[in-house]
Structure formats: structure tokens, C-alpha cells
Image (cartoon, rainbow, N blue to C red):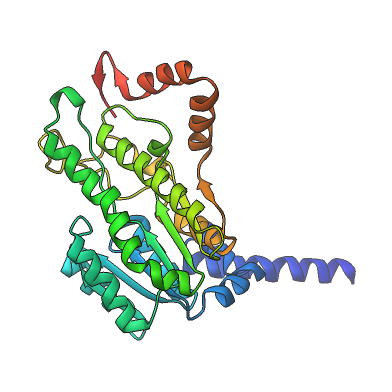
Amino acid sequence: MKKVLKQTFKTTSQQIINHFSQSFLFTTTHLSYFCPYFILMQDFFKDKVVAVTGGTDGIGKALVEEFLKLGAKVSTCGRSQDKLYDLQLNHPGSFLHVLAADVSNEQDCKDFIDSTLQTFGGIDILINNAGISMRALVQDTDLATIKKVMDINFWGTVYCTKFALTSIIERKGSIVGVSSIAGYRGLPGRSGYSASKHAVNGWLEALRTELLDTGVNVMWVCPGFTTSNIRNVALNNEAKPQGESPMDEGKMMTAEECAHHIIKAIEKRKRTLVLTFTGKQTIFMNKFFPKWADKLVKNFFFKNGELVK
């Protein structure tokens, strides 16, 4: 009898697994839906107002979609009106507010935050995700490339945070900056990008210290290499999109998995979040063995004296 019950249970379990496997591809995010922790997160974020910059691609889009699943009211911006429209079409009936905006423009940032406040009445969580990269050696780079990267990555974070700050303090909410390993370790061919992420980390750390007694949590996230469109639109030495990725995107963490880690860290009100073993290893090596790290990074990005990644 026990043998029959055991076989029946095994068969039924396998049928359930096969059913869901055929319905959709299992990921870390999907599996979380079947765990009690997902329910806790859903309770935590339900009806929270979350503002995400750069929510039409990559990590930003994944964050928008995950927060909507968790019952949050989401506001996002991006430069493409078409992509924002598609995002709305894919989420009918959701509490989703969108606005076309370029975060390098101060007035656009003010309009985005003001429209979010008018639509939802306040902001609980601000995620400064919008960003752009570059790929060019300093010697060959037009200064316009570095300036544009700084305007989007650093000043975009400053503008949106400054305009949303009063509401976030009132709600004892969270401010998040999606930074990079390049915020801890300068990367060749990404001088402007590295500078912008170092600036973001330092600025958010200062802000976190200022707000320690207010109940507001400030966190910066360093995802490491994540599958997204950021390398395809990375600026070349003439401040124009390079149009292709020099990296193997298939071997990177997915944007959906990255978003899941970020959301868990927000719920836990962490100070920092560094993802991937390579990212943690790079920060460790750079802190304790900086000269060795210089050589390792050089060997990773260069081949026969040429920048290949």
C-alpha cells in the first residue's frame, strides 16, 4: 500500500511539474511565486507607489513588471513614447503611470516626479535606474561622450531624487540607485561610465548618512553584467550609439532575475547590493590587491593591445 501511495505521489508531482514547465519557463522569479516569501513581499509592496526611471528596457522594465505583479502603483519614464505605449498595452487595468522624459533634462525630471505625485498622491520608493554606458578609450573620446554619460547617470539621479525627496521623507520610504561594479572599480573603455557610477555611489552614501534619523533607506545596487540593451546603445568616441554588444549576452544574469534581487533588497532595506560572483570578486580584489586587479582587468578587456570588450 505504501509503495502504491509513494508511486502515485511521485507520478502526480511529476505531472504538476510537467504542466507548469510546458506553460512557462521556470526562473528564480517564477519559483518565488510558489513560496511564502512571495506572499510577504506582495503584502509589503501592495499599494506602495514606486517610481522607476528608464522603465522601458532591461532591468527597469523588469522592475516595473514585477512591482505591478506585487500590487504596487508604478510610475515610470523613458525617452521612447512608443515603448511606453507598448508597456501600457501589456498591462491593461494596472496602476501604471507613464511619461516620456529624458532624465538628463532637469525639467523633464521635475515633470515626471510632479506627475507621479499628482497621479498617486506621493512616492514611497524611487528607483533611479535610467542609465547609459560608453565604449571608447579616453585618448580617442570626444568630451561630449563623457558629458552625456554624466548627465544621464549622475545628474538624472540627482534631479529625480531631489524632486521626490520631500514625499519620500514624509512616507519614510526608500531611494535606490542602480549603479554598477564600475562604481567601485574603474573600467577601461568606460571612463565616463565609471566616473558617473562612482559619483552616484558617493552621492547616495552622503545622502544616506544625512537621512539616517528620518526613517528613509538609501541603497545602491551593483548588478554586474546583466542582459540588457545598455551595451547596444552605449556611446562610442563620437557620442553616438555603438549599435552592437561586444559581450556574450547569453552568459549574463537576466534582467528579470536582477529585478527580483533588487526588490528583495528593498523589502529588507539593505544598504548595498552587489550581484554575481564576478562582481563581488572584482570589488574584493580591487580593495585588497589593487595592482593585481589592474592587470586582471586589463587582460579581460584588452587583447593584443586592443580594446575588445
Q: Nearer the viewer, residue 285 or 120?
A: 120
Q: Quadrant of the N terminus?
A: bottom right
Residue at the extreme right: 1
Q: Is residue 63 visible?
A: yes
Q: Quadrant of the C terminus?
A: top left
Q: Is residue 221 above or below residue 251?
A: below
Residue 217 location in percent, x, y? 52, 60
Q: Find residue 306 and report its image quarter.
A: top left
Residue 257 location in percent, x, y? 47, 55
* Residue at 42% in and 38% down: 181
33 to the left or right of 158: right
Q: Is residue 106 above or below residue 124?
A: above
144 to the left or right of 40: left
Q: Is residue 35 visible?
A: no
* Residue at 51% in and 51% down: 209
Residue 280 location in percent, x, y? 53, 36
* Residue at 58% in and 64% down: 32
Q: Nearer the viewer, residue 173 or 182?
A: 173
Q: Find residue 54 and report its image quarter.
A: bottom left
